[in-house]
Image (cartoon, helix red, strand yellow):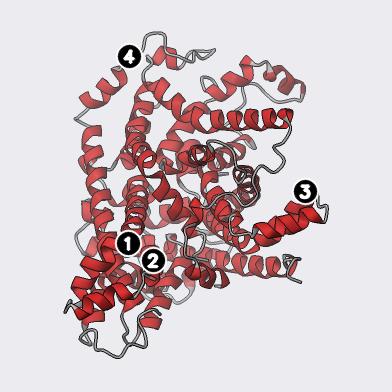
């Protein structure tokens, strides 16, 4: 630290605590306390509407694994929906922004402008994006089907056996395609910016050396860019998985969990259980189970990427 | 954590550095043409929907739902906006706008005050428990936010804050990201500044407010914009902790609007556009700070 090692007395012993106090009060009340309270609730039959909230041990958790319980099907259907969304969206949200970042890392007039343009959708809220796409994806009057019709692509799709009009929000797999595509549109700029920062950290001498060795553009990407981005890539994959597991607003506003319950994600299920049915003990157990599942996924992913992605120019 | 150490040594923000390898592969005229065409197509894809939202909001409903679609409105009308402003009975859009503005501003101020004081102590003061506090604060960055939603609802209820602006502004104000972000910035400020102030007899509060904060304006601006944006756009939390129509924020109100005006698309798009304009304007003027802040968030892993 810059300040250590100087012997003059700088402040009273309580001064640092006075600086910390306002943050700590809010932090303890709304971060630490709820984390512990949630754990406590998950061990009780905690119904918001009832006075009596008996201790039930791990019953809220075991019920989630008991196929005869009331919550089993609902919960795992939600987990499945979240898993489908995560598996479908994460690869796109990791790969497309990487390509875009490499493109924007060239020097050309207006690159700051384009960077801002691709980031722009991200500053809109999910409510705005949800309403907008619900309208654009409407099977009958939406612009997406309108454009497909306008360029005559509907005939080509018809030849492939696709029913017209395409039920973007009311049929599968279209509903998933819609939710994934709109999420890519909405959040792609975020990952692009993070990649760009990472790209600018790669020493340009490495590219010079690769060019001297006669490496092609692709070989430079493969052997200099990718290894240089290893830590950034790990970070992007992690936060994108986390963000996908939080999927809520898009499915609520665009498909309303449908068709059937296919896009009713884990978060919709959990919040419905806790804040609509007010069975908060059960909902808290769901949230911890989902958090644990995410933790396991992150650990596996960190281990996997550590093994595969050793930077070549260091070894 | 390797990234973290590296970033704290970095002196200059990454966004302003020139590209590492200029002009690679953009040599031939044809190549350059394809490159620009590609950028143009991407720009249309990214801006198009936002423009479409505005264009629809100034159409009549029959035109907005016509097949095939018209692109520019035949006779532009602000009827949808008049509808929204007239609906101050059950759909008080103006009220929602002011609620959002109040909640986001209050939240922003709280984040700045709480995060800057805590980050100052963690970056520049020596005290027992500093290391533990920092580790605990940063480790909450790795806990998914949904874990806090249900118990926080209960805490807000006990405090009597349900259906009030406090429920929106306060719970997220202890921003672990904010502390981490500012601590890093404060740590990089040269120690000589405060040595000089100490010799002049300044106390820590004076050093904080007159030396450190004025020198941290870019970091504070970044945190301010990011916290305002995230609060303005928050959807999950307000739809559960607010009930009265007159207390809603814009995102929560939009959901109500969509339910009520299922097929009146100009009204729905006008509502969405009203919710977008402030953040789009904010972004246009502060995009340097927003993008800088996001670049930095990549270093928190």
In this figure, which residue is indicated by the disc labeled 4? B77
Residue B68 locus on image (x, y percent): 54, 12
- Observer-side mark, 2 or 4, equals 2
**Mark number for residue A212?**
none
Could you tell me residue A302's position as x and y percent? 64, 68
How far apart are the alpha carbons under marks 3 and 2?
37 Å
Check disc 2 and report the residue beneath it: B185
* Residue picked out by circle 3: A218
- Disc sitting over residue B216 in the figure: 1
Instruction: Give the residue drawn at x 42%, y 43%.
Output: A123
Q: CA distance from mark 2 to mark 1?
A: 7 Å
| Residue B65 visible within the image | yes
Estimate the spatial distance between the alpha carbons at disc 3 and disc 4, rounded to whole Å. Answer: 52 Å
Mark 4 to mark 1 CA distance (whole Å): 46 Å
Query: Dot 1: what SS?
Result: loop
Q: Give the distance between the C-alpha atoms of the residues marked 2 and 4, in whole angstroms.
A: 49 Å
Q: On the image, which quarter does residue B179 sit in?
A: bottom left
């Amino acid at each position: 630290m810059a300040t250590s090692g100087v012997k003059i007395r700088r402040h009273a012993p309580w001064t640092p605590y006075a600086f910390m106090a306002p943050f700590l009060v809010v932090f303890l009340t709304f971060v630490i306390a709820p984390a512990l309270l949630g754990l406590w609730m998950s061990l009780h039959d905690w119904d918001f509407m009832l006075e009596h909230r008996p201790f039930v041990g791990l019953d809220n958790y075991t019920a989630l694994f008991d196929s005869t319980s009331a919550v089993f099907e609902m919960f795992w259907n939600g987990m499945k929906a979240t898993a489908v969304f995560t598996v479908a969206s994460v690869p796109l949200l990791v790969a497309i922004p990487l390509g875009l970042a490499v493109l924007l890392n060239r020097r050309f007039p207006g690159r700051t402008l384009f960077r801002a343009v691709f980031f722009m959708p991200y500053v809109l809220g999910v409510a705005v994006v949800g309403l907008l796409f619900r309208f654009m994806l409407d099977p009958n009057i939406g612009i997406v089907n309108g454009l497909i019709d306008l360029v005559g692509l509907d005939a080509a799709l018809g030849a492939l056996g696709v029913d017209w009009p395409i039920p973007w929000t009311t049929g599968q797999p279209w509903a998933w395609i819609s939710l994934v595509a709109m999420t890519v549109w909405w959040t792609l700029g975020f990952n692009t910016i993070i990649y760009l920062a990472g790209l600018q950290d790669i020493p340009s001498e490495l590219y010079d050396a690769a060019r001297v060795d006669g490496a092609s553009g692709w070989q430079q990407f493969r052997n200099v860019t990718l290894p240089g981005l290893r830590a950034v890539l790990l970070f992007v994959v992690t936060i994108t998985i986390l963000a996908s597991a939080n999927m809520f607003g898009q499915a609520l506003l665009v498909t309303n969990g449908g068709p059937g319950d296919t896009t009713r994600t884990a978060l919709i299920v959990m919040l419905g259980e806790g804040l609509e049915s007010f069975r908060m003990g059960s909902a808290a157990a769901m949230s911890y189970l989902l958090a644990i599942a995410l933790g396991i996924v992150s650990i596996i992913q960190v281990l996997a990427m550590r093994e595969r992605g050793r930077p070549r120019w260091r070894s | 954590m390797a990234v973290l150490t590296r970033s704290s040594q970095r002196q200059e923000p990454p966004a302003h550095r020139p590209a590492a390898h200029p002009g690679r592969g953009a040599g031939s005229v044809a190549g350059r043409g394809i490159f620009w065409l590609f950028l143009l197509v991407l720009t249309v894809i990214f801006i198009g929907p936002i423009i479409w939202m505005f264009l629809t909001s100034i159409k009549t409903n029959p035109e907005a739902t016509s097949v095939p679609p018209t692109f520019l409105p035949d006779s532009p009308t602000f009827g949808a906006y008049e509808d929204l402003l007239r609906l101050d009975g059950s759909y008080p859009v103006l009220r929602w706008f002011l609620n959002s503005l109040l909640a986001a501003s209050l939240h922003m101020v709280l984040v700045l005050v709480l995060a800057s004081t805590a980050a100052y102590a963690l970056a520049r003061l020596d005290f027992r428990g500093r290391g533990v506090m920092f580790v605990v604060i940063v480790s909450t960055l790795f806990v998914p936010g949904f874990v806090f939603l249900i118990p926080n609802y209960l805490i807000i209820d006990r405090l009597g804050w349900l259906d009030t602006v406090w429920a929106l502004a306060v719970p997220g104000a202890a921003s672990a990201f904010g502390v981490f972000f500012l601590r890093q910035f404060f740590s990089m400020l040269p120690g000589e500044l405060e040595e000089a102030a100490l010799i002049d007899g300044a106390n820590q509060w004076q050093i904080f407010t007159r030396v450190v904060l004025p020198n941290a304006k870019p970091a504070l601006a970044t945190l301010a914009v990011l916290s305002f944006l995230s609060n303005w756009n928050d959807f999950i939390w307000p739809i559960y902790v607010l009930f009265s129509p007159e207390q809603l924020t814009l995102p929560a109100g939009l959901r109500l609007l969509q339910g009520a005006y299922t097929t009146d698309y100009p009204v729905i798009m006008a509502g969405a556009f009203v919710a977008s304009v402030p953040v789009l304007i904010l972004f246009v003027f502060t995009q340097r700070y927003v993008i800088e802040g996001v670049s930095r968030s990549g270093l928190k892993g």
